[in-house]
Amino acid sequence: MQSPVNASGKRPARRSYDARRRRQLAAESLHSVRTHARELFLTQGFGATTIAQIARAAGVSAESVYKNFGSKAGLVRAIYEESLLGAGGPPAEQRSDLAQKTESDPVRLMERFGRFTTEISPIGAPVYLLIRDAAASGDASMAALLRDVDEARYRRMLHNARQLVGRGLLRPGLTEAEAADVMFTSTAAELYETLVIKREWSAERYGTFIARTLAANLL
C-alpha cells in the first residue's frame, strides 16, 4: 500500500521505527529492576525478598524479571556484575587496565589501585556479603554464585599480577601467584566489612590502607 500524497504532491516520508529508543527504554527498565532489587535485597535479605516484590517496586511484571534474569540468583549476579563497573564513566576494569599499561611509578600505581577500591567496594562489597550470607544459609544457587564470583575475582587478580610481573614492577623473587594472593586478600569484601562496616572507617581511609598494604607487600 502506497503512502498518501500530501497537498504538495509529495508522499510524506515514512516514520522509521525507532529501535534505538526502544533499546534505551528496555535498558532503563532493566536498570530500574536492578536498582529496586538491590535495595530490597540489602534491606530485607535474600530469602525474604521475592521476585513479585521487586517487580512491583520497579513497575514491571514478574514474568519480565524472570525472562531477563532467570531467577533471584541471576538477578543478584547481575547486580554484583553491575557494581564492578564502578561509579560511572568507563568501566573500572578498563580504567585499571589502562593504569597498569601507562603508570610508570609503581607506588602511584598502587595508589590508583587503592582509589579503585575506594570507588568499587562501597558498591560491590555489600552485594558480595549478601551472596556469602545466603550461601551460608544453605541456598544452593547462591553457593554456586559465590564460587563463581570468587573464581572470577581471583582470575582478575591473577591478570593484574601478570601485568605487574611483565612490566618488572614487583619485588624481585615475588611470583605472580603470590602477588595474586596478596591482591585477592586485600580486595576481599570481608576486609571492607571489618574496617568500614564494623570499625567505621571512611572509604577514603580504607582505600589508602589498601594502597599502602599492596605497596608494602608487592613492591
Image: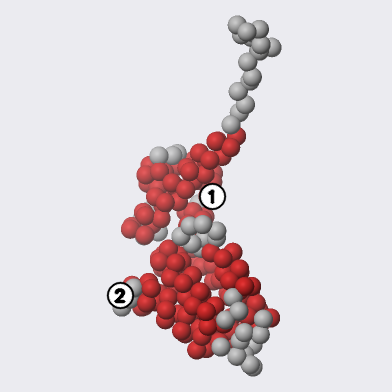
> Badge 1: few (under 14), some or many (20 or more) residues near its Cα, within 10 Å?
few
Q: Which residue is outermost to the bottom?
A: 173
Q: Position of residue 55 (x, y in %)?
A: 41, 43
Q: Is residue 14 above or below residue 120?
A: above
Say which amino acid is labelled 2: Glu
Would you name the residue on which mark 2 appears?
200
Q: Position of residue 148 (x, y in %)?
A: 56, 67
**In terms of secondary structure, where does tag 2 sit?**
loop
Q: Position of residue 154 (x, y in %)?
A: 58, 74
**Residue nearer the viewer, 69 or 12:** 12
Pair 2/1: label in front? 2
Q: Quadrant where the N terminus lies? A: top right
Say which amino acid is labelled 1: Gly
Residue 138, numbered label: none
Q: At 55% from the left edge and 60% from the top edge, which residue is drawn?
A: 91
Q: Quadrant where the C terminus lies? A: bottom right
Q: At 53% from the left edge and 40% from the top edge, which residue is drawn?
A: 24
**In terms of secondary structure, where does tag 1 sit?**
loop
Q: At 59% from the left edge and 75% from the top edge, which residue is drawn?
A: 103
Q: Is residue 155 above or below residue 19?
A: below
Would you name the residue on which mark 1 appears?
70
- 142 vs 161, left or right, is left
What distance separates the C-alpha of mark 2 from that of mark 1?
A: 36 Å
Q: Position of residue 102 (x, y in %)?
A: 62, 73
Q: Is residue 8 visible?
A: yes
The colour scheme is secondary structure
Report the label total: 2
- 84 vs 196, left or right, is right
First in sequence: mark 2 or mark 1?
A: 1
Q: Is residue 32 above or below residue 156?
A: above
Quadrant housing residue 169? bottom right
